[in-house]
Amino acid sequence: MKPGTRLKSAACDTEVMVIRAADGQIECGGASMGEAKPADAAPLAADFSAGTLMGKRYVDTNGNYELLCVKPGKGSLSVDGQALVVKDAKPLPASD
């Protein structure tokens, strides 16, 4: 998967753009994401139903994955079953 690829959730309305990715399966709502939305929606897993927020970047704990949410939805993002978290903003430098 290369940077700039748009992925769509099979379980909800979430769409993300890949910023950084390694070898692994990106999921939303417990279902795999793909470049095309499937005709039949997958069920939303209870463990991955926290939702996504538009404009937020989601990362894994190792820093191997970074996804930008371009369309929010009810499912939450994960990679191979490990939940992704919202990336913290960089603090601005202090001006004295």
Image (cartoon, helix red, strand yellow):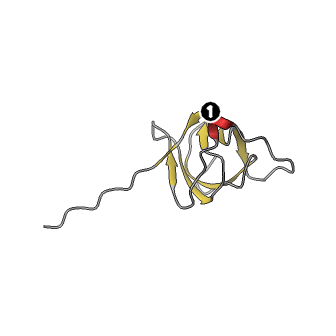
The image position of residue 52, as x and y in percent, is: 59, 52
- Furthest residue toward top: 81
Q: In which quarter of the image is residue 95?
A: bottom left
> Which kind of residue does numbered mark 1 sit on?
Asp
The image position of residue 92, as x and y in percent, is: 28, 61
Q: Mark 1 points at which residue?
A: 80
**Looking at this view, is 15 or 51 the one in front?**
51
**Looking at this view, is 95 or 49 the one in front?**
49
The image position of residue 88, as x and y in percent, is: 40, 51
Give the answer, above or below, for where 94 lies relative to 35: below
Q: Is mark 1 on a helix, strand or loop?
A: loop
Give the answer, above or below, for where 24 lies relative to 59: above
Residue drawn at (44%, 50%) of the image:
87
* Horizontal side of residue 52 vs 44, given as left or right: left
Give the answer, above or below, for where 16 lies relative to 60: below
Q: Quadrant of residue 71?
A: bottom right
Count of numbered circles on the image: 1
- How crowded is the residue under tag 1: few (<14 C-alpha within 10 Å), some, or many (20+)? few
